[in-house]
Image: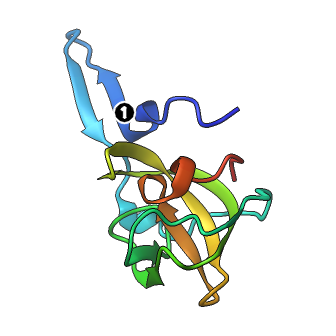
Amino acid sequence: MRKASSIGAAVILTVAAAGVAVVGAAAPASASCSHSHSNVDPKFGQLFNATNVNIRTGPHTTCGSLGYGQLSHSVDFHCFASGDRVSANGHTTYTWTYLRDTTTGVSGWVADALLDNLGGNVAC
């Protein structure tokens, strides 16, 4: 089964003692740039759906970029995990896929909104 609802992973809802709902952001991204992953997804091919796609050190927009994926590049998906919200190509996702760009040899995290079929199908 593909990712359930990733919206719940992006927001933490806490009900205060007075019954007031307080919405807060998830933990700081800087603490999550080194995220565990494993090579368990067999998906492979030209799967970027945009040009100059950041391949990052972690599943957050604040994590450093290791390189850029292109439409013509082949990639090997490894697994997906929750991360920052990204909107692109008419989709908004809170999940990121760890992959290896086999054209350049760069491995890292890419927001699922920037990948065909919204990224990988196997959780990390």
Label 1 neighbour load within 10 Å: few <14, some 14-19, many 20+: few
Q: Which of the 4 image quadrants contains residue 91?
A: top left
Q: Secondary structure at mark 1?
A: strand
- What amino acid is labelled 1 in the image? Ile
Q: How many marks?
A: 1
Q: Is residue 28 above or below residue 121?
A: below
Coordinates of residue 12 in the picture (x, y in percent): 36, 33
Looking at this view, is 93 or 13 the one in front?
A: 93
Q: How is the image coloured?
A: rainbow
Instruction: State the residue lying farthest toward the top.
Output: 19
Instruction: State the residue lying farthest toward the front.
Output: 72
The residue beneath circle 1 is 12
- Quadrant for the N terminus in the image: top right
Residue pictured at 50% horizontal, 58% vertical: 115
Residue pictured at 67% horizontal, 83% vertical: 102
Coordinates of residue 31 in the picture (x, y in percent): 43, 65
Coordinates of residue 60 in the picture (x, y in percent): 40, 62
Coordinates of residue 38 in the picture (x, y in percent): 75, 63
Residue pictured at 53% horizontal, 78% vertical: 72
Looking at this view, is 46 or 96 the one in front?
A: 46
